[in-house]
Amino acid sequence: MDPEEREEKFYLSEDIMVDIFSRLPVISLLRFKAVCTQWRDIISSPSFASLHLKCSTSNPTRHSILVRTNFESKLIPFDPLTYSPFSNLDIYCNLGSFGQRVLFVGSTNGLLCICGRSGKWICLWNPSTRLFKKIKTGIHRRSISFSVAFGHDLIANDYKVVVIHLISRQGAMRTGVKVWSANSESWKEIKVDCDFSFKWRVCGTMVKGFAYWIVGNGLGSNRKLLVASFDMSTEQLRLVPVPEGYSDPYCFYGLIWKDKFALAAFDGTKMYQVWTIENDSVGKESWTKKFTFELDFGFSLYTINAGNGKLLYNRGRQGLVFYDLETRKMKTVEIRKYNYLASGAHYYVESLLSIKGFQRLKENAKKMNLQQSHILFEI
Amino acid sequence: MSSSTELTEKKVFLLKSLDGVIFEVEESVAVQLEVIRELIEGDCARPFISLYNVTSEILALVIEYCKHHAETCSGGTSATIADEDLKTFDNEFMNVDENILLELCSAADYLDIKSLFELTCRTLASLIKDRTIIEVRKMFNVENDFSVVEEKAVRKEFAWAFK
C-alpha cells in the first residue's frame, strides 16, 4: 500500500478490540473507559466483565496469592509460580481503610470478603476497581462466636456470604446459619438439624461453590467431629462424620486438593493422611484415603490454607513458607521485618466484577506503596 | 519413475491480494489460513483465491509468518527447540511499525489464523496497557465522542487509574 493510501484511517473491528481488551489489566481498562463512548460501553458491560474474568482465570500468569499481613494491615500479592511478591499488580491493598481489626474471609472472581472482628459487619470489595459494599450481619448480641464464608453460586451466578454463629439460649448453645445473597441483597436463615461448634472465625476451605468447616457436635466423650459443607447453590448445609477410627489424638484440617475438598488427619508427629469424599450421595458419603505427606513443622495456628493445594506457614524469624501439596515442594520467603505475621491467604485474580450497591472508596485512598513489599522481602 | 516425482511434487496455491498481487504458496502455508481451508480441500482454489481484505504488503508478512511456522513444525527438530525457535521468530516478527501491527491483527482475524491473531492481540495489549488516553486514541484512530460533561464524569469515576 502506498503511503497516501495508508493515510486512510484504519480501524479494528469491535470484536477484535474486545479480544485485545480481555488481555488488559483492570487499571488500563478503567482508564480506557474515557477513550470514547464505544470503548466505555464495551468495558462497562457485564458480558465483557465475564469474558475478561474467564481470560484471567485461564491464564496462570494472571493469578496471585494475596497474603494478609499484620504489617500495617496490608494484603501482599505473591506470584504463585515463583512465590515472590508481585510488583506490577495495581490493586488497593490497605485493609486498614475498612477498620482497625478485620478478618480476611475469602476471595472469588476478583471479589474479596472481609469481616469486622466483632462479626457485626461484612464487606465485599473489589481491590482492582476499588469499589465496595458493607453489609450488616445482624448477628445477635448474645452470639458467642461466629464463622464466615464467601463463595460463588455458579448456577444463579450469585455471590453469597454464609455466617454460622453460636447463640446462648436459656443456658444451651444453639447453632444458627444465615446466608446473604448479592442478587437478593438480603439475609436468609438456614435450617440446621443439629447444633455444632467450630474453632475459627473464618471458614478455612472454600472451593467451587462450597464452603467447608470442621465442626464438633456433643460434649465430652460423646463429642464427634464432623465436616460441615454448605452448598452455595442449593443453600443446604450437610454434616458428614470424619473417617471412622480417627478420634483423639488426631487433629483435622480442611485442604483444597485438585479442586476438591480434602481432609488432612494429623497424628501429632509429622505425618498427615489426606482423605477425600468419594461417594457424594447424601447419607452414603464415604471417605477414601488418598496419600500421606510429611511436614517438618506441624500444623498450628499459623498454618493457612492458601487454596489450589497450597499451604502457607509462618516460621517467625525464618520467614514465610509456601508448601505445594501436589508437587510437595516448599519455598521459604525471607522476611526482613521480624514483627511480620501472615494471618490469611487466598488466591486472587483481577476482575471488573461489581455487586449491586457497590460504591467508591474515598479518593484519598492511596495505592499500595509497592516499595514496601521490597522492604519486607528479599527478592 | 514418473509417479514418484508426482508424489514429491508439492501442491501450490495462488493467493491474490486486495491490490491485485498474486502470491504462490505451498499447501503447508495455505492450510494455515482457515478461511480458505474449505476451498483448498474442496479443490475449488483454481485459478487463484482472492483475499479482498488484505493488501500485498500485509499478505507478504502473513505468508512469511505461516511459512516459518510450517517449516519449523515439520523440520524434525525436537518440540522444545521448535518452540524456542518459534518464540524467537514471533518476537522478531512483532517488531514492526504499529500501523502494520494493527493491519496484521485484522488480517489474522479475517484469514482466521489463530496463532497469529493471538500473537498480535497479545502484543497490542502489552503495547497499550500503560498508554494514556490520547496515545491510544491516536493509535487506534478513535475519535473522542464524549461531551465535555460526559468525559469529565468518566475520568472522575476512576481518577486514580490516570497516572
Image (spheres, coloured by chain):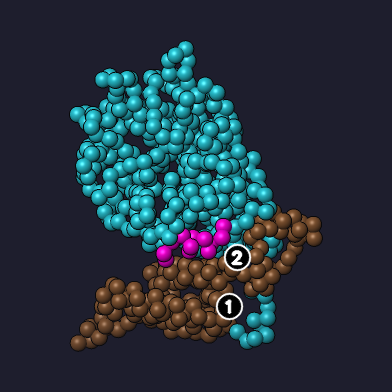
Chain colours: A cyan, B brown
Horizontal and vertical percent for residue B66? 41, 77
Left or right: residue A242 compared with residue A73: left
Residue segment shown in magenta: A368-379
**Front residue of this view, candidates A140 and A254:** A140
Q: Amino acid at mark 2?
A: Ser
Instruction: Examine the structure image and report whether residue A378 is included in the region drawn in magenta.
Output: yes
Residue sitting at x 68%, y 63% = A35
Residue A233: in sight, yes or no? no
Horizontal and vertical percent for residue A146? 47, 30
Q: State the residue position of label 2.
A: A13
**Residue neighbourhood size for the residue with mark 1, other residues' Cα within 10 Å, grouped as few (<14), some (14–19), many (≥20):** some
Residue sitting at x 38%, y 19% = A194
Left or right: residue A118 compared with residue A196: right
Horizontal and vertical percent for residue B146? 75, 60
Q: CA distance from mark 1 to mark 2?
A: 16 Å
Residue A300: in sight, yes or no? yes
